[in-house]
Structures are given as structure tokens and as C-alpha cells.
Amino acid sequence: MGYESRAQAIYRITNRQSFPAGPPSRLEELWGKDVFSLSKMKQCLPKAVFKSLKKTIQTGQQLDASVADIVASAMKDWAIAKGASYYAHVFYPMTNATAEKHDAFVSIQGDGTAISEFAGKLLVQGEPDGSSFPNGGIRSTFEARGYTAWDVTSPAYLMETDNGVTLCIPTVFVSWTGEALDKKTPLLRSISAMNRSATRVLKLLGHTDIAPVNSSCGPEQEYFLVDSYFANSRPDLLLAGRTLFGKPPAKGQQFDDHYFGAIPERVQVFMQDVEQKMYRLGIPAKTRHNEVAPGQFEIAPIFEAANVASDHQQLTMTLLRQTAKKHGFVCLLHEKPFAGINGSGKHVNWSVSNTTQGNLLDPGDSPHENAQFLVFCAAVIRGVHKYGPLMRAVIANASNDHRLGANEAPPAIMSVYLGSQLETLFNQIASGSMNDTYGKRGEMRIGVDTLPPLSKDAGDRNRTSPFAFTGNRFEFRAVGSSQSVSGPLIVLNTMLADSLDFVGDLLESELGKGVELNAAIFAVLKEIMHKHGAVIFGGDGYSAEWHKMAVEERGLANLPTTADALPCLTEKYIEELFEKTGVLSPVELESRYEVYSEQYILSIEVEAKLAIDMVKTSIYPAAMRHLAEMGNTVAGLKDMGIDLDRDNIKKVAELTNSMMSKVSKLSTALAKEDFASTEEHMKYCASTIRPMMDDLREDADALEGEVSDDLWPLPTYQEMLFIK
Ligand code: ADP
Ligand code: MG
């Protein structure tokens, strides 16, 4: 890109017309239009069939084959009436992606004619070629079959693109031997595990009417928008999703003038378009605003049941990307697209509830509910302490490593923020001193009188905590913007299930000894605080003191990179956790470790190769052109007896030399192949390749500050961040 075209591009982009979005439709007209929802099924299914299906949805029982046929036929008629000619089993492989296999509703008859058909067996089970999805060695290629099966708890919907309308059916994806190859299967299993354990504890707390307990999730998605012209002229944004080079602009986010600022018009039109599409799909988009960095935005829906929320989150990411394209933007979901500028996260708001007891993490105001809240909250605290490394591992990937540990994002040390009131309360429980303050007849009563009114004020917040209690839910803030929320939800549900089993065992044993219920609960809470209270931290999570204190005094793990975090998946206690809760078998867990570490290594190697290419084919030539132009002038003037300042030429020459020698060192380092283990290979990427790339970048970015701007081949940070 020479001077002329770059300047023209900027002119063109500045004068881009907003994509005509048209007037917004009324929510009531759009809502759930493209979803084969329960209410639509009720309308078109025979009563008995609908009842059976509803039961399957509510209890998770297998769908009866005769019912499947009728549902499939009704679903097909509905979809065809809305213009669909294809159906797709949608599944969520172990990458963060969404995968689809499309099939036509076509069936050839004996006489050679074709009819549109969709039998129950096609609804209930599909068979995509599983071999092209990562499986961590579970299947060898000759038995590459993978099966998809309809997840009845998540409704089918229509996706409209320029190529027509497709009926999409959310499915689980398993191997021919039944092992999970996806993120949905273990999520569903983790919900059942949590339900079993929560029900047991609720019974012990004296409840008799207990509806199934489910987890809820409200994910906040941060993203960047960059004009597609700029993004497409940056090989690094295209292939790696982040800039591998780029000098920080003179103005970054220091002015704090972007957060909650006015949303640029072109972006507003884009957002409205995305939201209308979300409404059609029944996704309750609610909040939109600018984020801290220039060019950064956020969208959050109203929370939903974890499984549906997770499917909807995947759809939201797809819609953001697709719709951005139409509006002349590229939507970057990478955790750190721009060095030195705030990265993007995905806060996973999580709670557990049922229809009979309500939100189990709501402090509430009746004594009974408070005891219940304290027990569930303590169970979460225990989980984070015991399985902190697992929480870190499940959000570990090459891109999120740029955020975690940096002083802008929740640190790589897992801790719990409770807010000052709750923290005080739990500390009192630990010391047992509540007896004197609140107890009657010298005994602890866990009731409203012991629980100070909790402020739900958003002001009482700690943005530096990776995992914070926010009024009636926990907010897992360390999750990365590009990641599926399923992984974090699986871990949260599973560790809660484990903790609730621990609570159940202890409560049963106390009650068995004849201890009164309130005293037994208090004993459990105290025990948890003694063993696991060290994970509670209300201070500044970014500070150096915390990093030191967390590790040295509290024994918490600080796992700054994926290479440090992922090996936790191979540890015995993690294997036991997943096996005893029935969420992942040892083989399934091992395959996940293999897949995630492979992905980590691959993405770093791809980035390193790309960095080398970019230096050789665009940055080096720009520097050489600069030298040639300036050098000739200086030499010419010197002939005339005029001595010009040569600092710039000298500096560019030195930086170029240094940069090229780093390129060749990086190439050599990349060629290394003999690694004793995957773990060693990951460590090599983290501690050798990555630092070498950073070092190379230093020279390239310094050159950007010296080389004549009209010769610089890559769109700059200020162009990408500020021109909309
Ligand atoms: P903030 O940015 O202040 O943290 P937002 O309003 O942007 O809050 O997002 C909060 C998210 O938490 C929303 O998706 C919201 O629906 C969700 N949420 C609220 N209550 C719960 C709950 N009990 N369980 C799970 N998610 C919840
Ligand atoms: Mg928010």
C-alpha cells in the first residue's frame, strides 16, 4: 500500500455511508420469530406429543422415537414455510468455534421424483465427518465417525444468510464409542451433577419440594471494531486476529474519553442490526456500550439457563462477525488485538437456581434463605480454593495469556472477592466469634439477625478480581473474549457439585451425631473457612504485594501462561473430580489436554512464522526504501558541501540490521522439533518463542517511528483505532 492508496483509503473510510439499517422493528414483532420455540411446538404438535417432548426438555430423558418423527415433520414444515431448504446440525467442537453440517431436505423416491423429507432419525442423530475436528487421539482416522444428536433443551432456529435460510439444530457431538468430542456434552453433564448434589443439600436443609436446580449465565462480550479496509491490509489481523506489530499511538486511552461515551453512528447502526438479528433468534440482548479502549464495545444479554446461554453466546459471536462484515467492519474477538491498549474479556455471570427455592446465591432476607445462601456461597469458595488451577486452565489459551497477568486484566491467580460486608461475615464465621455478637443462648443462629443487610450497590466492586460476588451471582472475569463460555460453566458447575457433596457428607455426619441443624451448618461453614478462607481477597489484585502474598503466604497458584496452567488437567485430583461427578471420563479429559495444548503450540508457531513473513516482505523493504531515498539525498548534498544530520539514517540502518538478525534467530528457534513432551513444547513456546517475538517487535515498532510515513506499508494504530 503506497502513499496514494493509503491516503485515499482514509478519505474513503471517513466518508463511508452507514449501511442503511432501516427503522428499527418493534421488539414484539421480532422476538423469537426464527425460533422453533415451545409455544410454536404447542401450536403445531398433537397434545400427547407436545407433552412428551416437554417432559424430555424438563427432565433430560431420551426422546421417544415415535415422538421424534412427529416433531421432525412439524419442524420441517415450519422451516420450509419460512423459506428453508437445508437443515444443519450445529455443534461445538473443542475449539471455541461453532461447526455446522448442512443437508438438504431431499429424498429421492423409487420413481425418480424428489420430495422434501426430514425423518425423526435425522433430527435425533446426524453423522458429520468427525475426522476434521480435534479429538485428542480419541478416534483414529479410520474410525473417524462422530455423531451429533439433538439437544432437546436448546430450541432449533433458522439462520438467514445471503445463501438462503437454514434450519439449525443444536446438537451434542460424540464419538462412535460415546465419548464427548464437544463442549456441550460435558456442560449438560455438569448441570446434572450440580443438580444432584444441590438437591441433596437442599433436602438436608429441610426442603421437601425441590425443583431441578440449573445454573444461569449472563455473558458480557467485549469486542473491537476496525474498518475492514484497515483490517484486510494487515496480514496479522487477518490470520492471527491481533496485531503482531504496531507502534502505540500518541493518544491511546489515557483520556478515559471512550468508556460510556457516545457511540459513533456507524457503530450504532451496526449494533442495532446485530440486536435485531438476536431478537429474531430469541437472544435477549440488553446492554450495549463503549468500552475503555478506543474502538472497543460491549454487548450483554439478559441471563439465561447455562446451556441455552452458551448456545446463544456462540450465536452472538457469529452474528457479531457476520454483521460487521456487512457494515464494512471487521469484528475482533481476540483478547488482545492491540498491544498497550486494553484487551477484551467475557465476564461470565453465573448463579444457580430452581423454581422452588429461587436463586441459591441470593442473600435474601429470611433466616432460612440466609443459611441456604451461606452454605452455597461457602461451597463456591471451597471450589475456587480447591480447584483454582483448573479455573485458570479452562480459560488458558495463547490469546488470553496476553491479558491475564497484565496489569489491566484479572490476574492469573484465582481468588474470590466477596465485598467487605460478606468478607467480614465469613471472617467472623471462621473465628466463631459470632456467638458472642449475635448468638442466643450461646449458640450460633444463622438467620437474618446474623447477616448484615447486603448492599447490592454496583459501587462496591473490585475490578481487579478474577472472580467476584456481585450481589446475587459470581462474575468470572478472567474469561477471554474469544472463548466459549461452556468451559468455564463446566468447571464452575462441577466444582460446585463436588463442594456440595462435601457439604452434604459433613452435614449428614453432624446431624447423625445429633447436632441441631443450625449448629451443624455453622460447623460446616467454619470448616470450609478454616481450610479454604485463604482464597478470599478484597484488595488490589494487580498489585505486586498481592502476587507475592498470594503465593508465599496463602499458597495460591500463580499460573501466568497457558504452558503453566494446562498441565493441571493431567493431575490426579482433577481427573478424580471429573470422573466422580461423571462430567468427563479420564480419556475425555486427557483428550482435552491434548487438544488444548496442540492449539496453544500451533497458534504461537503460526504467529511466529507470520511475524517473520511480515518483517521480510513488508517492514524490511520499507526500511530499505527509506534508507535509499534519504541516503541518496544526504550523499547528493554532501557532494555540494552541505552536511545534513544523519541520525535518522543511522538509526534506521541499525534497527534494520538488528531486526534482521532477530528474524534469523527466530527462524532457527522455530525449526526445533525434538521435544520430550507436549508440556516441554508448550514451555518452549511460552518462554523462548514468545519473548523472541516481543524482542523482534521492539525493533519493528521503533522503525515505524523513524521510517517515512508514506513508505510505511501497514495501517497504523491510530488509523485502526480512531477512524470509524
Ligand atoms: P456489569 O457490566 O455492571 O457487570 P452488565 O449489566 O453489563 O453488568 O451485565 C451483567 C450480566 O449479568 C447480564 O448479562 C445479566 O443478565 C447477568 N446477571 C444478572 N443477574 C444474574 C444472575 N442471577 N445469574 C446470572 N447472571 C446474571
Ligand atoms: Mg458490563
Image (spheres, grey):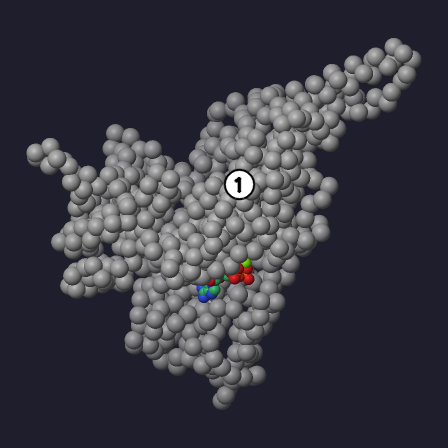
Residue for badge 1: 329
Residue at 39%, 53% (x, y): give it: 312
Report the number of discs.
1
Residue at 44%, 42% (x, y): give it: 322
Quadrant of the image containing the C terminus: top right
Query: Residue most toward the left?
Result: 111
Residue at 20%, 62% (x, y): give it: 50
Q: Residue 549's spot in the image, x, y percent?
A: 63, 56
Q: Which of 527 and 276 lies nearest the eye of the viewer?
A: 276
656 relative to 194 in the view: left or right: right
Q: Residue 550's spot in the image, x, y percent?
A: 60, 55
In the image, the residue with mark 1 has its CB under 8 Å from the nearest atom of ligand 2: no
60 relative to 674 in the view: left or right: left
Residue 645, above or below 556? above
Q: Residue 723's spot in the image, x, y percent?
A: 63, 41
Quadrant of the image containing the N terminus: top right
Image-quadrant location for residue 200: bottom left
Q: Label 1 crowding class (10 Å Cα cut-off): few <14, some 14-19, many 20+?
A: many
Residue 72, above or below 139? below
Query: Residue most toward the bottom?
Result: 441
- Tell me the element at label 1: strand
Query: Residue most toward the right?
Result: 641
Residue 387 seen in the figure = no
Q: Which of 677 and 54 lies nearest the eye of the viewer?
A: 54
Tell me which amino acid carries mark 1.
Answer: Phe
Q: Residue 23's spot in the image, x, y percent?
A: 47, 54
Q: Which of 189 and 635 lies nearest the eye of the viewer?
A: 635
Residue at 73%, 26% (x, y): give it: 708
Q: Which of 231 and 81 lies nearest the eye of the viewer?
A: 81
Residue 254, above or below 356? above
Residue 605 seen in the figure = yes
